[in-house]
Amino acid sequence: MRRTRPILVWGAMAAALVVPVALAASSPLLAWRDPVYIAAGFAGIAAMALLLVQPLLAGGVLPGLPLARARRIHRWTGIALVAVILFHVAALWITSPPDVIDALLFRSPTPFSAWGVIAMWAGLGAATLAAFRRKLGVPWRIWRGGHLGLAAVTIAGSVVHAMLIEGTMELLSKALLCGLVLVVSARTLADLVGSELRRHRRKRS
């Protein structure tokens, strides 16, 4: 059982990432979309996939991957997540600048736009805190609380954004991916906060 567990975990994660993309690629709606719009949509799907991977790496729960290495990869996937988000927005801008401006100014009539913008700014904020952690000079607990808080807003906003969109993603696979992102993120957040509280108690005792 111990030997098969890593295979099952990695296999389940791969399926959770690949299946929604494959089903979206087979959507008949793609026939009426231009290439830039399609690229923007798949960048959004890639962002959701990375949001599943990020907490798994931060928590160091992936089998066969030491915590120190997992967190180094976490930083690189964070950079990839920012790049994918910026590409998503830039491609949508090329498709329709007025729609992107309305979304950024929170005057878009589509509710999913506001959630996407909130998630975007929170994600960029979390990445900025990570990039300038040492230069900020704030205590570790405050920095970590800010980073985790912004990450939580990013995840929640992204899930609502994705679920409200009626697009190329197949509904069931999208719901399962979003559900996994929420469950994994909540578990990792609880574990990280719990470990921080235990460490603080040990220092006081």
Image: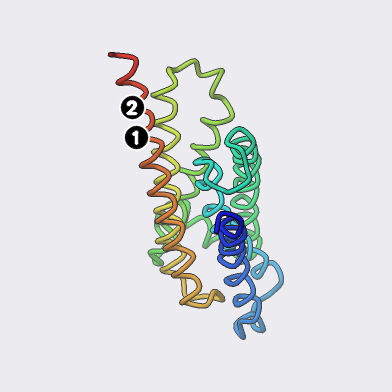
Q: Position of residue 104 (x, y in %)?
A: 47, 52
Tag 2 residue: 198
Marks 2 & 1, CB-CB < 8 Å contact: yes
Instruction: Please tell me which residue lies in front, 45 or 94.
Output: 45
Q: Residue at x 50, y 48 (%)?
A: 120
Q: Position of residue 108 (x, y in %)?
A: 42, 62
Vertical placement of residue 42 versus 135, above or below? below
Within 10 Å of disc 1 (Cα), the crowding (few <14, some 14-19, many 20+) is few
The secondary element bearing badge 1 is classed as: helix
Vertical placement of residue 135 versus 110, above or below? above
Instruction: Please tell me which residue lies in front, 75 or 123.
Output: 75
Tag 1 residue: 194
Q: Is residue 100 left or right of residue 194?
A: right
Q: Residue at x 60, y 60 (%)?
A: 4
Instruction: Please tell me which residue lies in front, 102 or 19.
Output: 19
Q: Which mark is residue 174?
A: none
The secondary element bearing badge 2 is classed as: helix
- What count of labels does the image hold? 2
Quadrant of residue 161 within the rendered picture: bottom left
Q: Position of residue 11 (x, y in %)?
A: 61, 63
Query: Residue flagged by tag 1: what amino acid is it?
Result: Gly
Q: Is residue 91 left or right of residue 54?
A: right
Within 10 Å of disc 2 (Cα), the crowding (few <14, some 14-19, many 20+) is few
Direction front: furthest residue: 1
